[in-house]
Amino acid sequence: MPSTTVKRIRRVARRAANSVTAAVQRLGPAPITRYIKGGRVPWSDGYSAYRLQTTLDTLADGHLMSLFRRGDPLPPAFGARLDERVIEYPWVLSRLSSGGGRLLDAGSTLNYPQVLAHSAIVEKQTVIVTLAPSSFMERKATVSYLFDDLRDLMIRDAVFDTAVCISTLEHIGLDNTQLYSEDSQYAEHNLAGYQPALSEMRRVLKPGGRLLLTVPFGQAEDHGWLQQFDQAGIQQVIDGFGGTIAAEVYYRYTAAGWQLSTADDCAGVHYFDIHANRETPPDGTAAARAVCCLELIRS
């Protein structure tokens, strides 16, 4: 039995967590209102809240999700002045069936309470792999955390039905100390450093298991903390995983928002690195100007 002291600490922790939740709820739409009134400038005050709300609204919209699932054109001005997450989350979740199974989140991009509660995820046994703990960690029996390197996972073979890797591959092998880890061993510069992670994701998937993967696409670029893949790079990703291609879909950003596109149409676009240039481009780009979405099946 826990001691009285431990019980008291737990009560204090619960009260503190509830106080934080209540404070956030009292803020209501204020951050989003400030973002809109401020001219909807990417990465300005309220941007993250607006992006999250837009993404959650999309995930709850059956018609929009069907467009992503079928690979149909999106509505005009979809996701204008927002980064690629507004494309990646609905594309990935539209391909996840509801119900059980084992899901690997390679990179911790599903680690939001609203996303983990989505009907496509909530019944699955989900393992979230990331380099270090984050400010939010779900306390549910169906969600586990593993702080590990995706290139050398402490997981046995053929465990998962599905692996999700949303805008993570482009960081592997590069300098993750800028944003994601304080460990100097991750201050790397190896543009091929992601390849072992592909092998590991293939290894931990069951035969017939699926990898749902997204990366920034366009002209090949090295930004130090991430890289952008061109068509040759995408082929290297596909070859590195092996198996078969179930889907290869491209979306492009312009001042008119995000829209379904082709690899050829996206080939020359550049990534906007907010960490290198704080001035928003005229087209309102927040990060990638194109994204490649892959569904790969382990043979």
Image: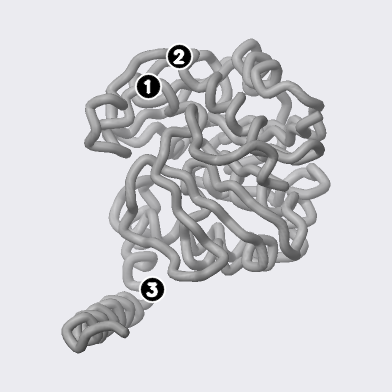
Q: Nearer the viewer, residue 216 or 194?
A: 194
Q: Answer yes or no: do the residues labelled 2 and 1 have beta carbons within 8 Å?
A: yes
Residue under pointer 3: 29
Q: Earlier in the sequence, mark 2 or mark 3?
A: 3
Q: What residue appears at the point 39 percent right and 32 percent down from the top-left corner?
A: 281
Q: Answer yes or no: do the residues labelled 2 and 3 have beta carbons within 8 Å?
A: no
Q: CA distance from mark 2 to mark 1?
A: 7 Å
Residue 207 in picture, x, y percent from top left:
79, 36
Q: Secondary structure at mark 3?
A: loop
- Label 2 or label 3, whichever lies nearer to me, is 2
Q: Which image quarter: residue 252?
A: top right
Q: Nearer the viewer, residue 258 or 95?
A: 95
The C terminus, quarter of image: top right
The numbered disc on residue 280 is none
The N terminus, quarter of image: bottom left
Q: What residue appears at the point 33 percent right and 72 percent down from the top-left corner?
A: 30
Residue under pointer 2: 191
Q: Earlier in the sequence, mark 2 or mark 1?
A: 1
Q: Nearer the viewer, residue 16 or 40?
A: 16
Q: CA distance from mark 3 to mark 1?
A: 37 Å
Q: Residues within 10 Å of mark 2 (few under 14, many from 20)?
A: some
Residue under pointer 1: 174
Q: Secondary structure at mark 1?
A: loop
Q: Above or below — where is 16 with respect to 38?
A: below
Q: Earlier in the sequence, mark 3 or mark 1?
A: 3
**Looking at numbered disc 1 in the image, what kind of residue is underneath it?**
Leu
Q: What residue appears at the point 28 percent right and 23 percent down from the top-left corner?
A: 187
Q: CA distance from mark 2 to mark 3?
A: 41 Å
**Looking at numbered disc 3 in the image, what kind of residue is underneath it?**
Pro
